[in-house]
Image (cartoon, grey):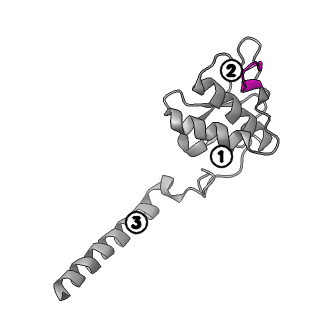
Amino acid sequence: MKCGRQLLALAFLHLAFSLLLCFGACPDARRHGNGRNSNQKASSGGENTWCIAKPSTENLRLNGNINYSCSQKGVDCKPIQPGGTCYRPNTIVSHASYAMNLFYKAAGKNSWNCHFNGTGIIISENPSIGSCNYPM
């Protein structure tokens, strides 16, 4: 039993030491829950920016982004519903991009408002297509 406890203690110490090293040396490990790095200043994305989904993101994560964004105050996702002006193209990437951009705009257009756990990107070219206009 004594040997098993010693091995468990050594494993715990190794894990604790690894975490300490990573938090001290890995800048991405010091992120707040909102995706902002602790030493990043609050900054605006600017007037001519939009938040869209990374096209390589898995559908399950994009669906989560739609659900989250559309449930937030100031976000109206009616345009991506069937018959809406942004329903077409009827793809999850397109719908997620529209919803994520609405959240980004409603939340203040800060870089961390487009993080979405690494699935959002800020662009400076208007992604509007056809009758679907992405608000600035």
Tell me if residue 77 comes above or below residue 130 in the rendering. below
Tell me if residue 7 comes above or below residue 96 in the rendering. below
> Residue lying furthest bottom in this view?
2
| Crowding at mark 1 (Cα within 10 Å: few <14, some 14-19, many 20+) | many
Label 1 belongs to which residue? 112
Q: Three-letter amino acid code at disc 2?
A: Pro
Q: Quadrant of the N terminus?
A: bottom left
Tell me if residue 65 comes above or below residue 5 in the rendering. above
Q: Which residues are magenta?
A: 79-85
Q: Which secondary structure lies at badge 3? A: helix
Label 3 belongs to which residue? 19
Label 2 belongs to which residue? 127
Mark earlier in primary sequence (3, 2): 3
* Magenta residues, dominant SS class: loop
Q: Quadrant of residue 72?
A: top right
Q: Quadrant of residue 32?
A: bottom right
Nearer the observer, 130 or 50:
130
> Residue lying furthest top in this view?
130
Asked if residue 11 can be seen in this view, the reply is yes
Mark 1–mark 3 CB contact (< 8 Å): no
31 relative to 4 in the view: left or right: right
Q: Position of residue 104 (x, y in %)?
A: 72, 39
Q: Which secondary structure lies at badge 2? A: loop
Asked if residue 123 can be seen in this view, the reply is no
Does the magenta-highlighted stretch encompass residue 44?
Answer: no
Mark earlier in primary sequence (1, 3): 3
Mark 3–mark 2 CB contact (< 8 Å): no
Residue at 75% over, 34% down: 102
Nearer the observer, 54 or 19:
54
Q: Quadrant of residue 89?
A: top right
Q: Quadrant of the C terminus?
A: top right
